[in-house]
Every structure is written in C-alpha cells, then in structure tokens.
Amino acid sequence: MPITPTPSIWMNGRLVDWDKAMVHVGTHTLHYGTGIFEGVRAYETAQGPGLFRLTPHIERLYRSGHILGMPMTFSVFEIVEATKQVVRTTGLNSCYVRPLAYYGYGEMGLDTGPCEVDIAIMAWGWASVRGAATDARGLRLKVSSWRRHDHNIMPPEAKTVGNYVNSSLAKAEARKAGYDDCIMLNPQGFIAECTAENIFVVRNGVIHTPPLSAGGLEGITHDSVRTIARDLGYEVRATELSRSDLYIADEIFVCGTASEVNLVESVDDRSVGYPGPVGTAVRQAFRNAVRGEDPRYSSWVEVA
C-alpha cells in the first residue's frame, strides 16, 4: 500500500518537512539491517486521534534496542510525546505511525560500537493492510517453506529491520502462489507466527497460541487480544502447535498492529470454520477497544 505524505517527520528531536527527511547512502543500518522499529496505530475516537497502546509499543522498541545493545538517545517518555506530536501534525483522525531507531552515517563495518544512533518517527494515512476483500471472505494461508529464525541465529523477540528479510521472502512466496499470507514454522517444526502477525487456533472452545519460545514476536496486539478473549470468557493457552493442528482447527484467526484481527478461511487449501464464533466475537471486541468504545480498555488508548 503506497505511503501518502504528511507534513512532518520527527528526526532526532525536531520536526523536518516530509520531503527533507533524508539519510545518507552511507547510513550503517541501510547496509547491515541493524535498525529497530515499531508500528503503532492511531484511531479516530470521540476525544481525537487515539494511539492504541502507544507506551507499550515504545517500551518494546527499547527492549529491542537492549537486545541489540543499541544505546537509545531519548527516553521512552520523550519518544511517546514525540509520537503524539507527529500525529497531531498530520491533521488525520486515524493513521499509522512508524518509530525507527537506526545506526546513522559516519562508520562502516560490522562493529556498531562507534556508530551514532538516530531516531525518526513518521506517520501517514494507512487503512488495514488486508482490506475489505479479505475481510469479507477470510484469509487463505499456506505453510511457508521459509523457517522462522532460531533464537541463537537472529533474536526473534527484537523487532529489528534485518529480521524482516525472512518475513518478506515468505510473504512473496505466499502471494506468488495465490495466497494472502503464510504461516511460518520454527527450526523444530512448530508454528511460530505469520509474516507479521501472531496466530490463534481454536479447538473445542479453547484458544491456543504458540509460546514466545516458538519464535514469534511478543506482539502488543497479541497481548491485547489474549486479554480481550479472556474477558469474553474464553480460555487462552500457550501451546506448541504443529502443522496438523492447523488442519483440524475449529477456527483460526491472526492479529497484528497493521492488519488488526483477521479470520482465516483455509490453510494449505484445507478449510477451517469460517467465520467462527470465537474469532468473530474477539474481532468485534477488539474493534471497540481500539476506538475507545469499551471503558474496560480506556487506558489502552492515548489521545494525541
């Protein structure tokens, strides 16, 4: 989906005109993929644009930096406030926000020690990456031939720029084969996640989702959905899941910041229950929560 420019991008403590927010071709992260980033959504609420779980997203950005040994140049509070400032400058009621920390220009080579850390925040209007068509019919998924990273190869719990080469390859494979997305297995053959979404499998009224040890990202939306599901009265378990568990599921649904909550119609051309009652209920409750319409989750929405 194309990016529509907005007035300003925050870079290292100041607002820069969209068209002037540039980096040098010698920027370290451009060469080595050593950046970290977040995706945050602002939704239209009665009080104005509301950023959904903004502070937890920025806290995860800092955890990613800590995993990489990247020294951050601003505090969590400063980045939270800068994000709100950027959203206000867009004039949009809802938008997608991308905070990014990266090693900048000045040093080259694998050693990041001498490198300076730059931070940028941009926001633009962006509807759900899935769109109305897949929302109406459900997702068609396949199990990817690409495996999710092992914990001792690339840290999957850090939302790093380089990690997403893995996801991009898997996504391209799925789309070329005629599917909406794919499910990735870890090196041990258990389900990790989709290319940019956590996954839930429903069986006999119980919701199962892979543990973090399986290699998925510690999703903010994932945490929100688990809380919502439990509040709706469903049991949610962290369970190692095999490929066969997908085929015999009563329902499958996936979630992520960019795509929100989506129901799955089939995996590897094997139909699953669609639309299922559990996923449908969770999706509607999630939609209410992000727009500040459910007082139980009002603390999750930070007005810009």
Image (tube, rainbow, N blue to C red):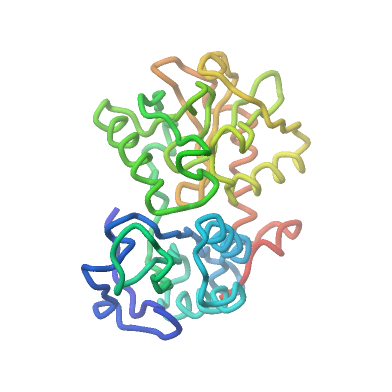
Q: In this view, does 271 lie to the left or right of 133?
A: right
Image position, residue 109 (x, y; %): 30, 60
Query: Which residue occupies 57% across, 17% down?
Result: 245
Compare residues 148 and 179 and report the one nearer the observer: 148
Compare residues 290 and 37 and report the one nearer the observer: 37
Query: Which residue occupies 37% across, 77% down?
Result: 9
Question: Residue 60's quadrant in the figure?
Answer: bottom right
Question: Residue 117's quadrant in the figure?
Answer: bottom left
> Considering the image in quadrants, where does the C terminus appear?
bottom right
Question: Residue 29's quadrant in the figure?
Answer: bottom left
Q: In this view, does 76 lie to the left or right of 37?
A: right
Looking at the image, the residue that sits furthest to the bottom is 14
Picture layout, residue 102 above or below residue 186: below
Compare residues 189 and 117 and report the one nearer the observer: 117
Query: Which residue occupies 27% across, 73% down?
Result: 23
Q: In this view, does 183 lie to the left or right of 300?
A: left
Compare residues 170 and 197 and report the one nearer the observer: 170
User: Does any portion of residue 70 appear in the rendered image?
Assistant: yes
Q: In this view, does 242 lie to the left or right of 105?
A: right
Looking at the image, the residue that sits furthest to the left is 25
Picture layout, residue 63 above or below residue 235: below
Tally of marks: 0
Query: Which residue occupies 43% across, 64% down?
Result: 98
Image position, residue 258 (x, y; %): 45, 51
User: Does any portion of residue 291 appear in the rendered image?
Assistant: no
Picture layout, residue 121 above or below residue 158: below
Image position, residue 292 (x, y; %): 64, 62
